[in-house]
Amino acid sequence: QVQLVESGGGSVQPGGSLRLSCAASGSAFSINRMGWYRQAPGKERELVAGITSGGSTNYADSIKGRFTISRDYVKNTMYLQMNSLKPEDAAVYYCNAEDVRGFFYWGQGTQVTVSS
């Protein structure tokens, strides 16, 4: 079992920055791929960025050049640095992890609000 806890969400003005964190515990050693998803009201949950155990990353087109995903393998923590935030980035952001058996785990989500 893997437990994921997100933090770092909040309210920011357009153009501002936030850094999300996702701390993994439990069988964190078994995690292969991790990712950040987001879900805005009335919309489906979408992948924002992903990172493999080898450090390969992928990003949604809508956030390329503005968001950076990273992972601290010693601390078992994943980060999402979000710069140049736009109102359309507002959503609940969820941390996701897939372990080596193919099981998926989700965090509880953290709210990001972007408004002036």
Image (tube, rainbow, N blue to C red):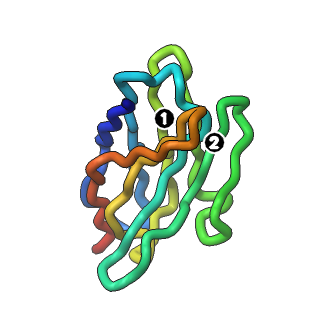
Residue at the spot x=31%, y=60% of the render? 112
Residue at the spot x=53%, y=48% of the render? 35
x, y percentage for residue 68? 59, 47
**Residue 78 has which mark?**
1
Q: Answer with mark 2 or mark 1, whichever residue precedes in sequence.
A: 2
- Nearer the observer, 20 or 36: 36
Q: Amino acid at mark 1?
A: Met
Is 19 placed above or below 31 here? below
**Snapshot quadrant of residue 115:** bottom left
Q: Residue furthest bottom?
A: 42
C-alpha separation, residue under disc 2 versus residue under disc 1: 9 Å
Q: Residue furthest top?
A: 74
**Residue 91 has which mark?**
none
- What residue does disc 2 label? 51
Image quarter hosting the C terminus: bottom left
Residue at the spot x=36%, y=24% of the render? 25
- Nearer the observer, 110 or 114: 110
Image quarter hosting the N terminus: top left
Secondary structure at badge 1 equals: strand
Task: Check contact, mark 2 vs mark 1: CB within 8 A.
Answer: yes
Q: Residue furthest front?
A: 101
